[in-house]
Amino acid sequence: MGKNLVTWWKLTVAIVALAHGAAAWAQAGDRGDLLDPNLADAEELGSLPHVDEGLAAVIVEGRPYLSAQQLDAVLAASLDRGQREAVYAGMFRQIDLNSASREEIMVIPGMTRRMAHEFEEYRPYTSLDQFRREIGKYVDEAEVARLESHVFLPMPLNTASEEDFRTIPGMTGRMVHEFEEYRPYTSIEQFRREIGKYVDEAEVARLESYVTLD
C-alpha cells in the first residue's frame, strides 16, 4: 500500500472516531478477576470449584473455545449444571451480545429467562454504554457490572480504536499494532492471513471471534 494511501486511511479512521465519540465502538466487558478459559493455565483452572487436575487438562486440550456453549459442552461431560454455574462464577468465555442464542445467554451464571429476554430486547447493541443503560433499568450497578464481565461486542477491524482492541482478553500492544498495520481489511481471509504471520491458527480463530468487518 502506498504511503499516501496509508496516511489517507489513518486520517479517515481518526475523523470517523471523532465523529462518533470514543464510546461508540464495541468492546469486551471488563472481566475483573474472571478467568478466560482460552488463556488460564492449568494451575489457575485448578483453583476453580469442581475443577481437578484431570478436568483442567481437558479444558486446556479443548481450546480454542469460540463460544460459551463450546466450553459448556466440555464441562457437561463431568459436571452437572449447578457445578458448572459455580465454575462460571470464576471463569467464562464471553458471549457476543448481538448474536448469542438464548441458550448461550442462559449459560451466564445467575441468568434468568426474564433477563435473557431483556438482553435480546435491546438488540442491536452499538456500545457497552447502551448495554449498561438498558440493563440498568432492571438491576443495580453492581449486577450490571457482573453481567457485563460475561459479554462483548465485536470490534470493527477497520475503525475500532487501540483502546477497544486492548479489551480483547490476552491482547498485547504488539498485536494491537499488527491489527492496525494491515488496515484497511477487505475480507476476513485477509485478517487470517496477516495475523497468522504472528500466531497459530487457534489463536487467530480466538482473536477473530472478537472482531467484525461490518
Image (cartoon, helix red, strand yellow):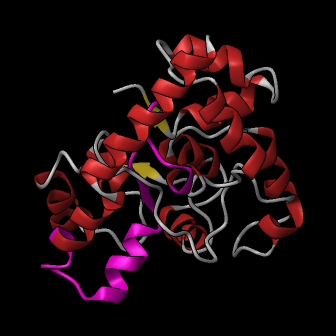
Q: Quadrant of the C terminus?
A: top left
Q: Going by the image, does 6 lie left or right of 155? A: right
Q: Tell me the quarter of the picture where residue 108 sits.
A: bottom left
Return the x and y of residue 163 as percentages of the image width and height.
54, 57
Between 71 and 95, the residue placed more toward the observer is 95
> Farthest front residue?
4
Can residue 100 be seen here? The reply is no
Between 110 and 181, the residue placed more toward the observer is 181
Q: Quadrant of the N terminus?
A: top right
Between 69 and 211, the residue placed more toward the observer is 211
Can residue 108 be seen here? The reply is yes
Q: Going by the image, does 164 lie left or right of 79? A: left
The answer to if 149 sits in the magenta stretch is yes
Return the x and y of residue 29 as percentages of the image width and height.
46, 63
Q: Is 65 rendered above or below residue 5?
A: below
Residue positioned 46% across, 13% down in the render: 186
Q: How many marks?
A: 0
Q: Is 6 rendered above or below residue 128?
A: above
Return the x and y of residue 179 as percentages of the image width and height.
63, 34
Residue positioned 47% across, 26% down in the render: 9
Residue positioned 48% across, 44% down in the render: 69
Return the x and y of residue 71 as percentages of the image width and height.
59, 46
Q: Going by the image, does 186 lie left or right of 2? A: left
Q: Which residues are magenta?
A: 134-163
Residue positioned 57% across, 69% down in the render: 83
The answer to if 155 sits in the magenta stretch is yes
Q: Going by the image, does 46 lie left or right of 163? A: right
